[in-house]
Amino acid sequence: MTDFPQQAHLISTEDGSFSLFCEEIGECYHSRFGAKSEAMGLYIRASQIAERWRNASPLYVLDVGLGLGYNALCTLESWLADPQAAAPLCLTSFEKNQALFNSLRIVQGPWQVNWPESWRSWIQALAPISALHSTTSGEVWKAHIPHPTRPIACEWTCVTGDIRETLFAHAPSSGWERIWYDPFSAKKAPELWAAPWLTQLRTCVAPSVTLVTYSVARSVREAFAQAGWSWEKVPTDTGKRSWLRVRRNDFPSA
Ligand SMILES: C[S@@+](CC[C@H](N)C(=O)[O-])C[C@H]1O[C@@H](n2cnc3c(N)ncnc32)[C@H](O)[C@@H]1O
């Protein structure tokens, strides 16, 4: 069994979905306005991903900080529910906290109690990849999830370990086209919001990439700009004022 979530306590967010408060970091995994609403509003709608997956070429989505699974599962749910989806979906989620991933994978997390059967089944479809293919620093798990009405499928890969060590072994040659950028805040966990890392991240994205994140902190905007990205604030459909949509500065309006 895992030692998780002993360092965390359960929070009920305003849309009825559950989240956790992480004691070690001193921060909640989601906005109090709603774990699921934020996943749908920011990562699905504000990223305009549905427009992209109606075009048939394979779509590579990078999920930074799988955490409690909401962003990944809302991505899967939305793609599976779209009768016009044409793109095979390659979703890769990275998570540093092995114990948290273990809880999520066996569907034993307290935040999962009111999850639909479909979410549970997609999580339970994850199977370990042999050690031969796994990276030195983490485990790799994969699920193959066919679309119910279209001749396409989603390959969902979960990689444990620090993304700064594991990302490049999993980067697609055509580059990531959508990025769900959801680490803890820059104040609490600055390493993934620093310009040198954001510069490295930019080397494995497609020209048309759209990165979305909840943080509009000045230090975050400055770090993206320094690292060769351009950003815009987008209005939210929750109680928060704005989110951030980020693109390569050489393809700003892709
Ligand atoms: C705010 S939570 C993400 C919530 C999640 N996206 C969801 O939908 O439930 C941030 C997550 O990023 C993970 N994380 C932080 N630093 C990381 C790193 N260097 N590499 C991989 N994961 C990291 C944390 O362990 C945590 O689970």
Image (tube, helix red, strand yellow):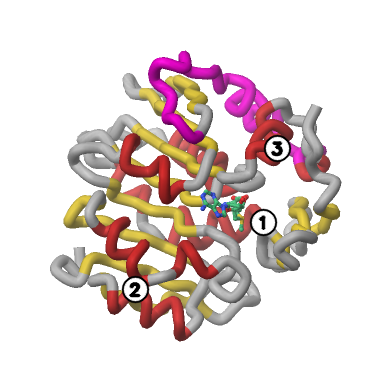
**Is residue 159 located in the magenta-colored stretch of the structure?**
no
Secondary structure at numbered mark 3: helix
What amino acid is found at the position of numbered circle 3 in the picture?
Ala
Is label 1's Cβ within 8 Å of ligand 1? yes
Whether the residues at callouts 1 and 3 have beta carbons within 8 Å, the answer is no
Most distant residue in the bottom direction: 218
Q: Of label 1 and label 3, which has the lower sequence position?
A: 1
What amino acid is found at the position of numbered circle 1 in the picture?
Ala
Name above or below for residue 30 compared with residue 240.
above
Label of residue 224 in the image? 2
Name the residue located 51 percent from the left edge and 78 percent from the top edge: 242
**Is residue 113 located in the magenta-colored stretch of the structure?**
yes
- Magenta span covers which residues? 112-137
- Is 186 on the left-hand or right-hand side of 245? right
- Is 110 on the left-hand or right-hand side of 68? right
Label of residue 99 in the image? 3
Position in image of residue 117 (x %, y %): 70, 27
Mark 2, other Cα within 10 Å: few <14 / some 14–19 / many ≥20: many
Name the residue located 81 percent from the left edge and 38 percent from the top edge: 3
